[in-house]
Amino acid sequence: MHSTSTIKADAFRPEQGGWRLFWLAVLGTTFLVIQSLAATARPESLAPLAEKVSPAVVNITTSTMVEGRTGPQGIVPEGSPFEDFFREFQDRNGGGNRPRRSSALGSGFVISEDGYIVTNNHVIDGADEIEIEFFPGAGQPADLLPATVVGTDPNTDIALLKVEAAMPLKFVKFGDSDKALVGDWVVAMGNPLGQGFSLSAGIVSARNRALSGTYDDYIQTDAAINRGNSGGPLFNMDGDVVGVNTAILSPNGGSIGIGFSMASNVVTKVVAQLKEYGETRRGWLGVRIQDVTDDLAEAIGLAKEEGVLITDVPEGPAKEAGLLARDVITSFDGFEVKDTRDLVRRVGDTDVGKTVRVVVFRDGKTETLRVTLGRREDAVDGDTSATGDDKLAPDETEKELLGLTVSAVRDDMREELGLEPGSAGLVILSVDETSGAWEKGLRAGDVITEAGQTKLASISDLEEQISAAQDAGRKSLFLMVRRAGEPRFVALNLGE
């Protein structure tokens, strides 16, 4: 007994390295505990999650009456010797032009016990009939239920449906998509390829993806999403919906691990408006804008590349508040403006009728204006742009400047160039393909209406602005250019 005690005491004597062994043992034990906790935190199976959320996931079947086809397509190959025979047979039996019913499949999910269902707009667009099928054996209605459309938003591809059920329906909640991080586990559920209820798992591959819409904010995932999954939910590990499965990137129509789900923080705002109004009501500022590049920032006098540049201010809230073309919006409603996409989304998410503070950079200093937002859906597309000053007679000579061959706009050119009657400017006749003007995207047919914030009516006006910019030591000249009537700003290098 004494011998054992002596051995243990000796083991922890510093001169024999005992303390080192002790701490190594502690660290080893701690590492094993951490591994065990990590294994405990990661579920061994997704079955409990699937059981929890699957009752709220639905299959959606739509049907539409379409005009009948006029020939025997699909029966025999085109050019076949039997083609005339089958066409004659169809015509004799009246089947060639007979309307037929076309069906399509999609997915959705229940968001309230009284029967509101979210899906994609493209799933139900143009449908005459919509039927909802619930997960079998989940305590939901066993029969197919007809659904009505409450409202749709093609801009985000979201639709809200409603069913009437004899019982309270099981439903799922929206989560905060901003908390979904790249690498987080997610689960997609739906009706892929018409095979019925199906689950696939993956991770968040990327965030804030934009496809083609103005208000896009997609979560990219490698969870398998196929045709028929459209409108189905993307769940986090808590069983909250963080996205609505909408699109895939695929060369063959099947999943290759690049799927896109509209972020729930976008969807919740849309759904709330569809539920209340049957339509969306987005804020409208009323400006045309473009991103600020390094060379534009230098030409404007900005210390750094920031905000968005106003290219045009048609009739609307911004014009009433005093915003001007060439203003750079750096802040909107208390938020720093990163780029055009950021501003468009912030304005769209702001309540119609709200008065907001807009900070702009103008003539070397910042100004704050108060703008009362209108409603985007009420805005008239194709607002007329500000007309130019036509008090000077146009100069019809041609000249090459800064890699551009230009001529004054003539009366017979304005309609073809998309300009307002009486507007002035210089039309670009040709562009040197080795010049900086070509690299900046200027092309024949573009019209330069302003240079250095001065309206142009003749070639001499442009020459004066070039000289003034060079005398001021500027590296570039600030131009307003219109293409098919649409304005944008270009900072053209004066070293050409």
Image (tube, rainbow, N blue to C red):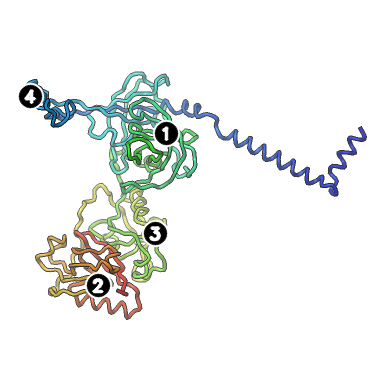
- Give the labeled residue for mark 2: 454
Amino acid on which disc 1 is placed: Ala
- Which of the labelled discs sits on residue 331, or is there none? 3
Q: Secondary structure at mark 1?
A: strand
- Relative to 145, is 453 above or below? below
Amino acid on which disc 3 is placed: Ser
First in residue order: circle 2 vs circle 1: 1
What distance separates the C-alpha of mark 2 from that of mark 1? 56 Å
Q: In this view of the protein, can residue 486 be seen by the observer?
A: yes
Crowding at label 2, few (<14), some or many (≥20) Cα neighbours within 10 Å? some
Q: Secondary structure at mark 2?
A: strand
- Relative horizontal placement of residue 441, taking residue 46 as reference (left or right): left
- Which of the labelled discs sits on residue 188, or is there none? 1
Q: Measuring 18% from the left and 69% from the top, which residue is drawn there?
A: 426
Q: Secondary structure at mark 3?
A: strand
Q: How many marks?
A: 4
- Give the labeled residue for mark 4: 88
What distance separates the C-alpha of mark 1 from that of mark 4? 49 Å
- How far from the left and from the top, in percent, is residue 102? 22, 27
Tag 2 near tag 1, CB within 8 Å: no
First in residue order: circle 3 vs circle 2: 3
What distance separates the C-alpha of mark 3 from that of mark 4? 69 Å
First in residue order: circle 4 vs circle 2: 4
Crowding at label 4, few (<14), some or many (≥20) Cα neighbours within 10 Å? some
Q: Quadrant of residue 155?
A: top left
- Please tell me whether mark 4 or mark 2 is closer to you in this view: 4
First in residue order: circle 3 vs circle 4: 4
What distance separates the C-alpha of mark 4 from that of mark 2? 71 Å
- How far from the left and from the top, in percent, is residue 143? 33, 19
- Please tell me whether mark 2 or mark 1 is closer to you in this view: 1
